[in-house]
Every structure is written in structure tokens, then in C-alpha cells.
Amino acid sequence: MTLILEMTITIILLFTGNKIGEYFNDSLYELFLQNGEHVKIKTTISNAYNCPNYCGIDHYHNVVIKNKLSKDKYVVNYKKINNSIVINGQEVKTVYEIKIDNKKNKKKEINKMHIKTENFIKKINI
């Protein structure tokens, strides 16, 4: 009986730990803009740091979600007038959520999933 109880508690802790890890992980997105460019961004729960606009590194740029526009940092804004998202002054046309699965054979599998603008707004709590 004790063995079954220990196994059950271990399984519950394992699943709970995975869900907590998923919640606190960074969220990765790829945004396609109206002007034809695309931007890779990363949102965090703390929403404390954002990359400067001149960041030339090919990576997922940290962004901050704010109501004000910023000329020198990566900032995501929401325009209620036409229900659109703006990053660095450019309107966002399409949003893809990126999930990276680390495989056991050390290959990373990248899954891209198209999400609606409304769902993106809800997800990042604008």
C-alpha cells in the first residue's frame, strides 16, 4: 500500500512540475509585419527587459508590452481603434507561436503555429 501511495505522489509531483515549468518558460513568437519584414520576439512573465532596436543579433528579441511607443527599444503596443498590434511602430499582420521541442538525439524540432491576433492579445495580457 505504501509503494502505491509513493508512486502516486511521485507521478503527481512530476506532472505538476512540468506544468509549472511550462507556465514560467519564455513565450516565443514570430511576427510578420505589414511592410514585409518579420521579427522574432520573446515575452517573459517579468516583462522587465527589452532589446534595443539596433540589436543586430539573430535571436528572439526580448520585448516589453506597454501602452507607449518607444523609438529605441523593442515594444509591443495594442491599438484599440482598429484592434491591431504594433511593434516598433510597424503594424503586425500575422502572428506565429513557436514551440521548440528538444529531442533525445539532440535535434531541436521547431513547431510553428499560426494564432489569431485576438488570441495573441489575450495571451500576452495587453
Image: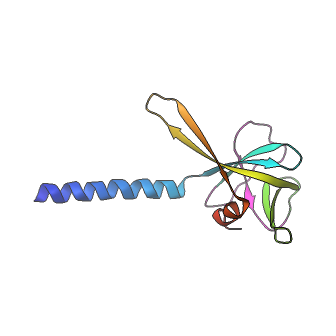
Q: Position of residue 125 (x, y in %)?
A: 67, 67
**Residue 73 included in the magenta stretch of the image:** no
Q: Quadrant of residue 47?
A: bottom right
Q: Is residue 3 left or right of residue 34?
A: left
Camera-side residue of 82 and 16: 82
The chief SS type of the magenta part is: loop
Please report the residue visible at 83 percent of the width from the left and 47 percent of the height from the top.
Answer: 53
Q: Residue furthest left?
A: 1
Q: Which residues are magenta?
A: 44-68
Camera-side residue of 84 and 102: 84
Q: Position of residue 109 (x, y in %)?
A: 55, 35
Q: In this rendering, does residue 39 appear at all?
A: yes
Q: Position of residue 11 (x, y in %)?
A: 29, 54
Name above or below for residue 103 compared with residue 122.
above
Name above or below for residue 15 compared with residue 38.
below
Q: Is residue 4 left or right of residue 102?
A: left
**Residue 53 included in the magenta stretch of the image:** yes
Please report the residue visible at 72 percent of the width from the left and 52 percent of the height from the top.
Answer: 95
Q: Quadrant of residue 112?
A: top right
Q: Count how many numbered circles sit on residues in the image.
A: 0
Q: Quadrant of the C terminus?
A: bottom right
Q: In this rendering, does residue 88 appear at all?
A: no
Please report the residue visible at 50 percent of the width from the left and 54 percent of the height from the top.
Answer: 22
Q: Quadrant of residue 78?
A: bottom right
Task: State the colouring used for the structure image.
Answer: rainbow
Q: Quadrant of the N terminus?
A: bottom left
